[in-house]
Amino acid sequence: MAKMKTYLFFREGMFYPVEEESDEKVLKHVPLNPGTKRIETVEGRVVYQAPTSH
């Protein structure tokens, strides 16, 4: 069994933790969670950054 890692999902005005095995698996959550602005590891490494529109 793979070791689980904690990722932080940032949304407008809030964030919440998600436990997952890898960056690849956590990225599969993005389409299922519209409004996710950023995903980071607990160490602060950015795994996902939503595109910005200007």
Image (cartoon, rainbow, N blue to C red):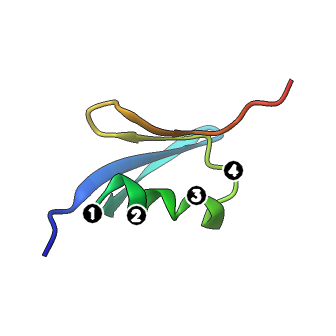
The location of residue 4, given as percent across then percent down, is: 21, 62
The reply, left or right, for residue 18 in relation to residue 50 is left
Question: Which of the two discs, 2 and 4, labels the residue nearer the N terminus?
Answer: 2
The reply, left or right, for residue 50 in relation to residue 25 is right
Amino acid type of the residue that numbered disc 1 sits on in the rendered structure: Glu
The residue wearing badge 1 is: 21
Quarter occupied by the C terminus: top right
Q: Are marks 1 and 2 in contact (CB under 8 Å)?
A: yes
Cα gap from disc 3 to disc 4, whole angstroms: 9 Å
Q: Name the secondary structure under disc 1.
A: loop
Amino acid type of the residue that numbered disc 4 sits on in the rendered structure: Gly
The residue wearing badge 2 is: 25
Question: Which of the two discs, 3 and 1, labels the residue nearer the N terminus?
Answer: 1
Q: Nearer the viewer, mark 3 or mark 4?
A: 3
In the displayed structure, 38 sits above or below 16; it is above
The location of residue 16, given as percent across then percent down, is: 44, 51
Quarter occupied by the N terminus: bottom left
Q: Are marks 3 and 1 in contact (CB under 8 Å)?
A: no
Amino acid type of the residue that numbered disc 2 sits on in the rendered structure: Lys
Q: Name the secondary structure under disc 3.
A: helix
